[in-house]
Image (spheres, rainbow, N blue to C red):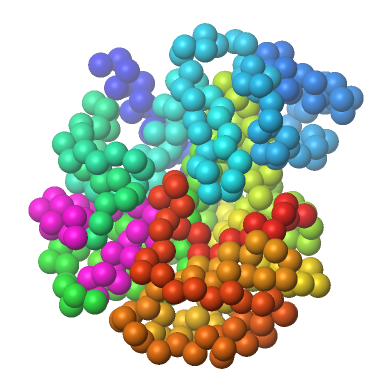
Amino acid sequence: MLNKVTKAFTLWNKFRFLKRSRLEIEALQSRKLRTLVAHAYATVPYWRDFFDKHHLKPADILSVKDMHKIPLTSKKDLVGLDRNQITSTHFDPKALTPIKTSGSTGEPFVFFADPGYLRIVSLDTLRSKIRHGLRPRNRMLRIGGDQTDLKRPANPFEQMFFHTALLSSFTAPEEILPVYERFKPHVVWSFISILYSFSLWLETRRIRLSWKPRFLLCSAEMVHDFMRRKVEDTFGAKIVDRYSTTELGVVADECQTHGGYHLYEDSIIAEIVEIGGLPHFVGTNLDNYATPFIRYNTRDVCQPWPEMTSVCGCGLTTNKIQTICGRDNDFLKSPDGQIIAPTRLIYLMRESYHVVRKFRFVQNSPETVRVTLTMKSKGAPVDFADLAENIRRVTGGLAADIHLADDIAPDPSGKMRIIHYSAGEPE
Ligand SMILES: [Zn+2]
């Protein structure tokens, strides 16, 4: 009971935070940052060595204005280290939850979350859902992850807000449909690629859904416009895209009315840093004390949004970022090293090759790109030579190696990246 009251109070405070002044927001961030840095220096060997190596002391980092003094860390700095190096000695290891990053970027990486942090993540997630229209005792269908469980009770606190049904990432469309129609979810939470594939499947069979959810929550993948249009049209509901990363937790979600993504500034200090000619999202998570991530380069490419000087039209005061443009390995590279925006390939495919149902581009050498296609109907004509020539043109000279497939399987995590660079480490 006490637990429920504490959670409800924390959640209420989290809602109040969204309307604080810039000064109040930065004061809270600075206070949390000081505590985190002192803790990391005192109890996490990686951070102790890192600060010593860069001649920094916790006393040098007193506010968000001092952030720039701390050099960036990225996954490649942490991935090879022993777990003890990146984990705080303050906790009993048995009390910590291991978190694995998805394999889609190639390097498996395990770190730890402490119970307090996990509570904050679930409250941040709940705040986002309520803000976008989740109401007490609604039904939520989650399609993602590796479990199917149609009767899973949420934890007692969350049960006040919703009932959940879970379908794994690998559920086939013909199995999703009856669950959806029976459960009639108010909220569907999934990867955009799953909802998009499901929408295409319904379209081919001329099936219309009989139930409209209140909104669709998408996370962990880039929501391309053509996917958004198709999915919103199929479900008759708006997509709310949420930017979260495994290491940093929930980072931002879409503004309801005025564009951009509002940052979760009580949990994250966000920065956009130019690296290799592209603006990258760099984040500091203020709540995970088991494995602190301080000025962590996500390698997600992201445009800034002007700093909020007044209240946003939606009523929030927190800063925004523009849409996430993709991870840095969602950008192919021409043979002479130019970065190719994924939209160029997406437009080419959408505008000129209507017979293609799905496509994937994987660049695994500096000169060639492997292209996999699935067709809308068997035997539909596609002129490979013409397509290869167009790809060469929009990519500044990449040779396309084109293959047909019956389907394009998602990554092991269940996500589907349609454009992928794997010709060595991007700069
Ligand atoms: Zn807004």
Q: Determine whether, in the image, residue 329 is placed left or right of residue 181.
A: right
**Viewer-side residue, 76 vs 245:** 76
Outermost residue toward the left in this view:
182
Q: Does residue 360 appear anywhere in the picture?
A: yes
Residue 257 picture location, percent across and down: 43, 64
Q: Is residue 104 above or below residue 400?
A: above
Q: Determine whether, in the image, residue 80 is placed left or right of residue 24.
A: right
Magenta span: chief secondary structure:
helix
**Quarter of the image containing the C terminus?**
bottom right
Q: Is residue 300 above or below residue 162?
A: below
Q: Residue at x 21, y 43 (%)?
A: 165
> Quarter-wise, where is residue 331 in the image?
bottom right
Q: Determine whether, in the image, residue 226 is placed left or right of residue 169.
A: right
Q: Does residue 301 appear anywhere in the picture?
A: no
Q: Residue at x 60, y 10 (%)?
A: 90
Q: Is residue 371 above or below residue 125?
A: below
Q: Residue at x 24, y 75 (%)?
A: 203
Q: Residue at x 58, y 34 (%)?
A: 109
Q: Determine whether, in the image, residue 294 is placed left or right of residue 265.
A: right
* Membership of 199 in magenta stretch: yes
Please count the marks in the image: 0
**Viewer-side residue, 98 vs 156:** 98
Residue 267 picture location, percent across and down: 54, 35
> Quarter-wise, where is residue 13 in the image?
top left
* Membership of 232 in magenta stretch: no
Residue 51 picture location, percent across and down: 81, 24
Segment colored magenta: 174-203
